[in-house]
Amino acid sequence: MAVIWGLVGRKIFLNATAPDEVAALDTGPIQELKPIVKDTFSLIELDRDPFLGIVSRNRESRLSGVSKNRNTKPANKNNKKEVVKWPQVTYFGLVKKGSSKNELALVKINNKTYHVKKNDLIDETIKIRKVFRDSIEIQFNKEKKHFKKQ
């Protein structure tokens, strides 16, 4: 056992006291890399469903639910959802006065600080929906958003 520990100690001692020389690696000549050739393939149309094993005789029956005209555009262009520009909202947390059970939330909306509670209206367009310790839910023009505590 002493012989093994002696060999281990000798290795550590020799490696610790070795001179700080950097060995030069001979890598040989630099080889140029070959360009990568893209693999191409083509898909063929199958007559048999590989999972169900059903053979389809005509293409029309397979495409019965699929629109044949691929260049069609949506019929109603007026369904675009209007983008609502939200005010800048920062939630700072809850404030509680002494032994009172009423909790007020500190909220900064468009650089104005408000003390609000649940269901309060600000500027008749912003409604405080829910108040939590770490976040607040605000409704603005029928759209709801959660804001985390800063």
Image: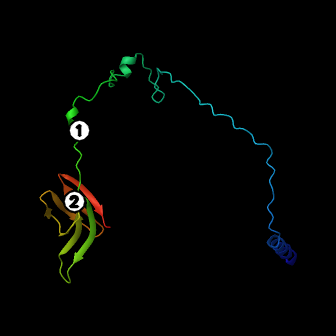
Specify whether 75 is left or right of 59: left
Q: Nearer the viewer, residue 52 or 47?
A: 47
Kindly identify the residue that appears in the image at 38 percent across and 22 percent down. 62
Q: Position of residue 17 (x, y in %)?
A: 82, 73
Residue under numbered circle 2: 138
Specify whether 43 is left or right of 11: left
Specify whether 97 is left or right of 135: left
Kindly identify the residue that appears in the image at 22 percent across and 43 percent down. 82
**Label 2 – label 1 distance at C-alpha:** 23 Å
Give the image quarter of residue 61.
top left
The kind of secondary structure element at disc 1 is: loop
Kindly identify the residue that appears in the image at 20 percent across and 80 percent down. 97
| Amino acid type, mark 2 | Ile
The kind of secondary structure element at disc 2 is: strand
Near mark 1 (Cα within 10 A), the count class, few <14, some 14-19 or many ≥20, is: few
Q: Is residue 39 above or below residue 109?
A: above
Q: Position of residue 131 (x, y in %)?
A: 23, 66
Mark linked to residue 136:
none
Point out the image quarter for the N terminus: bottom right
Kindly identify the residue that appears in the image at 13 percent across and 60 percent down. 123
- Please name the colour scheme applied to the rendered image: rainbow
Q: Position of residue 122 (x, y in %)?
A: 15, 62
Point out the image quarter for the C terminus: bottom left
Q: Nearer the viewer, residue 132 or 26?
A: 26
Q: Position of residue 3 (x, y in %)?
A: 88, 75
| Amino acid type, mark 1 | Lys
Give the mark, 2 or 1, whose residue is nearer the N terminus.
1
Q: In the image as oriented, which residue stretches furthest toward the right?
A: 3
Q: Is residue 112 above or below residue 68?
A: below
Q: Nearer the viewer, residue 86 or 54?
A: 86
Give the image quarter of residue 86.
bottom left
Mark linked to residue 80:
1
